[in-house]
Amino acid sequence: MHKRWRAGFLGLALTAWPWAAPARAQDPNTDFAAYRALFSVATLGPARGTSTVTGFTLHYRGAMPHAAFALATTPDGRSTWRFVGGGQSEQATRDALQTACDRDAASALGPGNSCHVLAIDGTVPARPGAPFQPAERHIGPFRTAPLMFRHGPQAAEGVVIWSHGYGGPTVDQRRRSAPGVLAQLNDAGWDVMRFDRDPADDLLPTATATLRRGLPLLREAGYRRIVLAGQSRGAWQSILIAAERPELIHAVLAFAPAAHGEASRPNILSEGLGDFRRLLAGLPADGPRLAATVFAEDPFDPDPAARAAMLAELARTRTAPTLALFPEPPIRGHNGVSDWRFTRGQGPCLVTLVQAPAAAAPRGLRRNPCGGG
């Protein structure tokens, strides 16, 4: 899976720079301050473009190994970047990224420009200190998001379970990146785990049964609060499970929830609005908290505006914080949650919905960037 965004003006050429390393090197695998210093704007050197910073400090952290991040800049400050996740090997990932990013650089910045690979699986070779080791921990059907920091069940605010979408029995999405907003929650003290499923055995009843059985294991491990988050079918099943086991779920973050197929193909999309209304009706009025995001021009959504209005109406009747996000273009499409502008603009509202006291949590319908929440 490739992700690429072109950054805005950066200010300086990408040249050698002194690393602002702490006097005493810490381990980014166990020390959160060291981890954030690794995935920080300082690691980018002179690069300060908004999309570049968002891409490296947040989006790249949702990648699956083997994962690499590359960057190119010019003396006048223009830049391009790309990361590759889920590669078969470190060398194959590096080679694929170098080729693709060099092509981007030549196209966007002019002939002769090329990228350098900044990070491999979270480790920045040019940076002093302990290397980062992708996390490999499991609790039941859940695995730690490899490039996220693991606070641990006792120290964490809780755990976020990420559920990817479903593309049919031959499309394996277990190597797809999680969105940048999850890294924002990770920074706020939440552990992030993935609920990855084999596409050959990912029917909705099977997936929901496995997810349901796994939730008590998270509590037994020591996590005080559980947030279910997902995209497409993963979002749909997250709402479904929250309705079935509300006593176990603190909040649901549902991005482009869908379970009826694509409009351009034979499907049951016409039933989507009614089924979505019934799905929401299953949630108790007093919890869990809910944020659901719909996007314009989503081919899996029969009517994004109607679903946004449905969510806004639900927010007026539930006592639990309930938020509908319907971002204005250019954020659009079924995978709009992966747009760096969504992370930058709407992410703060989602973190506030999860973190804030109920009276302070955002509610209703929001189309503009969230700012402080």
Image (cartoon, helix red, strand yellow):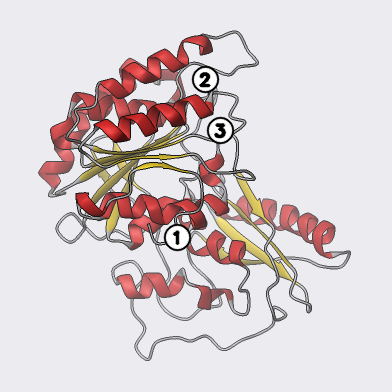
Residue, x 29% and y 34% (percent of image)? Answer: 316
Up-down relation of residue 12 to residue 369 (above or below): below
Mark 3 and mark 1: Cα distance apart in space = 23 Å
- Is the C terminus in the top left, top right, bottom left or bottom right quadrant? bottom left
Q: Which mark is residue 371?
A: 1
Residue, x 70% and y 71% (percent of image)? Answer: 9
Quarter where residue 208 is shown: top left
Contact between marks 2 and 3 (CB within 8 A): the answer is: no
Q: Residue 334 carries which label?
A: 3
Which x, y percent locates residue 216? 14, 35
Q: Residues within 10 Å of mark 1 (few under 14, many from 20)?
A: few
Which of discs 1 and 2 lies nearer the camera? The answer is 1
Q: How crowded is mark 3: few (under 14 residues within 10 Å), some or many (20 or more)?
A: many
Which x, y percent locates residue 110? 87, 64
Amino acid carrying mark 1 in the image: Gly
Q: Does residue 135 appear in this view?
A: no
Precedes in sequence: disc 2 or disc 3: 2
Q: Would you name the residue on which mark 2 appears?
A: 168
Amino acid carrying mark 3 in the image: His
Quarter where residue 335 is shown: top right
Up-down relation of residue 277 to residue 343 (above or below): above
